[in-house]
Image (cartoon, rainbow, N blue to C red):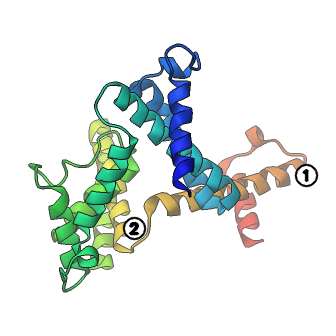
Amino acid sequence: MKKTEITQLIQVMKKLRDPEKGCPWDKTQTMESIIPYTIEEVYEVAEQVYNRNYGKLKDELGDLLFQVIYLSQIASEKNKFNFNDVVKNIKEKMIFRHPHVFRNTKFKNIKELKLWWEKSKNKEQNSILDSIPVTLPALQEANKIQKKVAAVGFEYKNDIDAIKKVNEELNELKKEIKIKNKRKIKEELGDLIFAVLDVARKLKLDPENILKQSNKKFTKRWQKLENYITKENLKLNNLNINQYNKIWNKIKKN
């Protein structure tokens, strides 16, 4: 990407925000009003990554970049910082956090590198978890929590121990369901989900990615089930769970 292209894009943003000649919608936006669009763009980028649609991914990355420039422009108007400050800051941060690449620092192994990484990010924090945004979706928040505590040694020794924790939480959930304690059911279900996510981390699998794949698989099978029901002149609302399971298993075999 040429330097002149990013400069021109910044100028486009400035014109859109011009108090007199700018776009009536763009010039009235605030950081708070723009954030929902920024979050939406992140999800649209993720969708094209999962779909491996590189043509659309290029477009969505452009939209996401524009959101960064948008927020930077508003900050510049408030005399806080500008887009160049954002670029300079991330450049310096990455150089500092990779001393093994940009300086002569040597790490014995990945674990030592991860410890340095966490230490470099947490100089002014009371807890290693302070840097995790509370606005993250719960799935991503749990994954980040588990990764950070694991980096300092708080984790199960192996995959099997992590799975044992899932079984433990499952048994606790069953217990509360039997006595119908709604508050504890909610709590134990949350613990079970948290434990399952930890298994994904131990297996070095991205929970968001594998859940997305499961969603796709279920959706495809369900659509086949709907097609089967239509061909057999049946109706969804008239089937019981046993009939559903019979059709579902037939579709899985095929």
Q: For this rendering, which residue is in front, 113 or 212?
A: 113
Answer with the quarter of the image where residue 236 lies. Answer: top right
**Quick one: label 1, few (<14), some, or many (20+) residues within 10 Å?**
few
Residue 131 position, x and y percent, is 22, 49
Q: Is residue 72 visible?
A: yes
Task: Decide if residue 241 is on the left or right side of residue 71.
Answer: right
- 50 in relation to 43, above or below: below
Task: Decide if residue 91 is on the left or right side of residue 59.
Answer: left
Dot 2 falls on a residue whose secondary structure is: helix
Q: Quadrant of the C terminus?
A: bottom right
Give the alpha-carbon distance from disc 1 to disc 2, as whole Å.
39 Å
Residue at 60%, 60% in the rendered image: 50
Residue at 51%, 53% in the rendered image: 3
Which disc number belongs to residue 200?
A: 2
Answer with the quarter of the image where residue 1 lies. Answer: bottom right
Task: Decide if residue 83 is on the left or right side of residue 168.
Answer: right
Identity of the amino acid at label 1? Answer: Lys
**Quick one: label 2, few (<14), some, or many (20+) residues within 10 Å?**
some
- Name the residue carrying label 1: 231
- Taking the view exactly as shown, the residue that stands out farthest to the bottom is 108
